Image (cartoon, grey):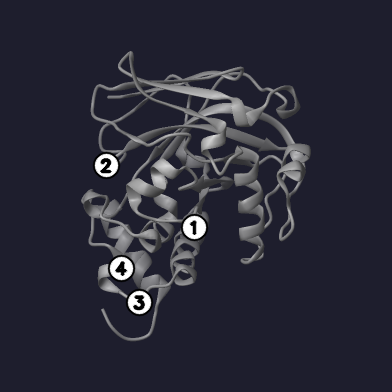
Amino acid sequence: MSGQFNAAVLADHLEEAVRTGKGVAPLTELWPDLTVEQAYAVQLETIRRKTAAGCRIVGKKIGLTSKAMQQLLKVDQPDYGHLLDDMVVENGGVIEPGRLLQPRVEGEIAFVLKKDLTGPRVTATDVLLATDYVLPALEIVDSRVADWKIKLQDTIADNASSGLYVLGGKPVKPSDIDLTLTGMVLYQNGEIANTGVGAAALGNPAACVAWLANKLHEFGIVLKAGEVILSGALSAAVWAKPGDHFRARIAHLGEVSVSFA
């Protein structure tokens, strides 16, 4: 692909995967000089289309915050994506076949805001003060790029490889726990798949949300009261296959689960 950069054309390419149910070639192969800024332009074009079609933005997700995920995807910085109302799965719910292309499951801590957060100088303390409560969450990441053959720009353009998410447990005030020491166990079909701790996400999940607020300032976007923020995986993602059941237990926050039909 040559010529002038066109976010709409690259967004069309990713939409082809959704339309056909088959992964497509990485954007970085089609457009080798794709920058991070251009990749976010592709993401925002896709989100613009979805909201125009009736979807509603309900929050944001932060990706690639743990060293495990950065090493897995060979990147060295976080990214972010948008959460839409059609991505929500009920706690204990079932994900039907064909809804995702190549899902992986992560255990995370979700923040629900009670105040807006506006960059560029947001701190982790600001995040805690602006948070109404935290919850255990499962994020089911997915990629429209075949075989997850992605670079940082590919995952950014693809809405940070967003798929679906599940919120569980019961609301807990962030002041009531130490998020950096909060442990997570992710079970797959009753067996421990991996473990993690809050500090695995940039040292503190609240620091991840602060990073996001400050990053969004570059695009004129504000984190709004009521939004759900998925603060990043606490360990490497686990491949999901039909028939799998996943459950995450996060200390002091409770459990969250989902099954794949």
* Label 3 crowd (10 A; few <14 / some 14-19 / many >=20): few
Q: Is residue 212 left or right of 63 when viewed as pictured?
A: right
Q: CA distance from mark 4 to mark 3?
A: 7 Å
| For marks 4 and 1 on the same chain, the one whose residue lies earlier in the sequence | 4
**Above or below for 93 versus 69:** above
Q: Are marks 2 and 3 in contact (CB under 8 Å)?
A: no
Q: Which residue is mark 3?
A: 33
Q: Is residue 74 left or right of 232 when viewed as pictured?
A: left
**Residue with the most extreme top position:** 190
Q: CA distance from mark 2 to mark 1?
A: 21 Å
Q: Which residue is mark 2?
A: 102
Name the residue type under label 2.
Gln
Dot 3 lies on which element?
loop
Please provide percent x and percent y for residue 62: 52, 47
Q: Residue at x 39, y 80 (%)?
A: 5
Q: Which residue is mark 1?
A: 47
Q: Which residue is mark 4?
A: 28
Figure quadrant of residue 193: top left
Name the residue type under label 1.
Ile
Query: In which quadrant of the rendered image does the N terminus lie?
Result: bottom left
Name the residue type under label 4.
Thr
Q: Residue at x 44, y 52 (%)?
A: 160
Q: CA distance from mark 4 to mark 2?
A: 19 Å
Q: Residue at x 23, y 27 (%)?
A: 242
Dot 4 lies on which element?
helix
| For marks 1 and 3 on the same chain, the one whose residue lies earlier in the sequence | 3
Q: Are marks 2 and 1 in contact (CB under 8 Å)?
A: no
Q: Are marks 4 and 1 in contact (CB under 8 Å)?
A: no
Q: Are marks 1 and 3 in contact (CB under 8 Å)?
A: no
Name the residue type under label 3.
Asp
| For marks 4 and 3 on the same chain, the one whose residue lies earlier in the sequence | 4
